[in-house]
Image (cartoon, rainbow, N blue to C red):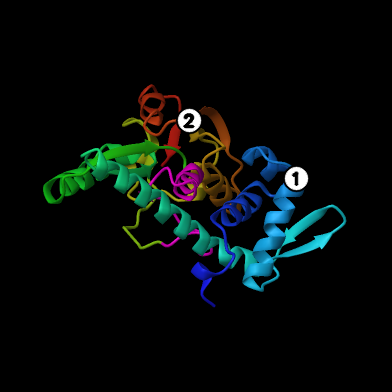
Amino acid sequence: MELLQSDLKLRQLKVFREVLRAGSTRRAAAALGISQPAVSQHVKQLETTLGITLFKRSANRIVPLQEAWELLRNVELALTSLDRLEASIFAMKNEEKQRIAIAAPSVFGFVTLPNVVAIIHAKTASNVRSISGSYDQIGEHILAGRADLGISRLPLDPRLFEWAPLGSARNVCIFHPDHRFSQQTCIQAHDLAGETIVDIDPQFAAHQMNFNALRFAGVEPNILVEFDCNGHEAGYVSAGLGISIT
């Protein structure tokens, strides 16, 4: 089927994407500034054009089928490519440098991103915009087209993202030099029993990973401080307020 010569419209794809992002036609309508019936009509027209049923309908709600999630990944790529094309054409018309937007947690701004920017600067005339956020926010920046690429952690939804391995890392335990752990070469989860912990805010995936590891070892976390920015744990640990896992 020649989609470019069919009745497929860009508006239909954008509405379809927003329905899956928002989780309902009502929230999608509010986000797009159109009526809920208009959203439903665009979705039905898209299904008719493609000849594919994308949603299961029951009462006043629609539930995405597997086909919808598979299509979303390609729709995201297509719409993001169009956004980039528009920005590129605008830059050429106005003789502006092209900008590359990279989304990553703030901790990568110390070493990794400066190295990446140095390579980009050496090989292209582009400038770079760095966008920080949590791992969940990195995915949102990519899906919304605010970032061209991002640094995140697994797992990632293969229906939404294309990804390639960049590296691997291990968790380390940070503690005061006078702490008993300074005599150990390896610290395991059960060693943290009874320890006061300085931990990342629950909004970050690392928080739940730390909790799961400790509870799996039979250790109930004793949290004294929760912080919301990577690097802040060093101050609390150096003050002797506890240990941290990062």
| Residue 113 horizontal/vertical position (percent) | 26, 43
Between 156 and 42, the one lying in front of the other is 42
The residues colored magenta run: 135-162
Chain-order first, disc 1 or disc 2: 1
Between 182 and 58, the one lying in front of the other is 58
> Quadrant where the N terminus lies?
bottom right
Q: Let me know if residue 217 is in the magenta part.
A: no
The residue that label 1 is drawn on is 36
Any part of residue 48 in sight: yes
Alpha-carbon span between mark 1 and mark 2: 37 Å
Q: Single out the residue that lies furthest toward the bottom.
A: 1
Between 79 and 86, the one lying in front of the other is 86
Picture residue at 56% right of the left edge, 38% below the top:
203
| Residue 131 horizontal/vertical position (percent) | 37, 37
The residue that label 2 is drawn on is 228
Any part of residue 182 in sight: no
Q: Amino acid at mark 2?
A: Asp
Q: Single out the residue that lies furthest toward the right.
A: 59
Few, some or many residues within 10 Å of mark 2 (<14, 14–19, 20+): some
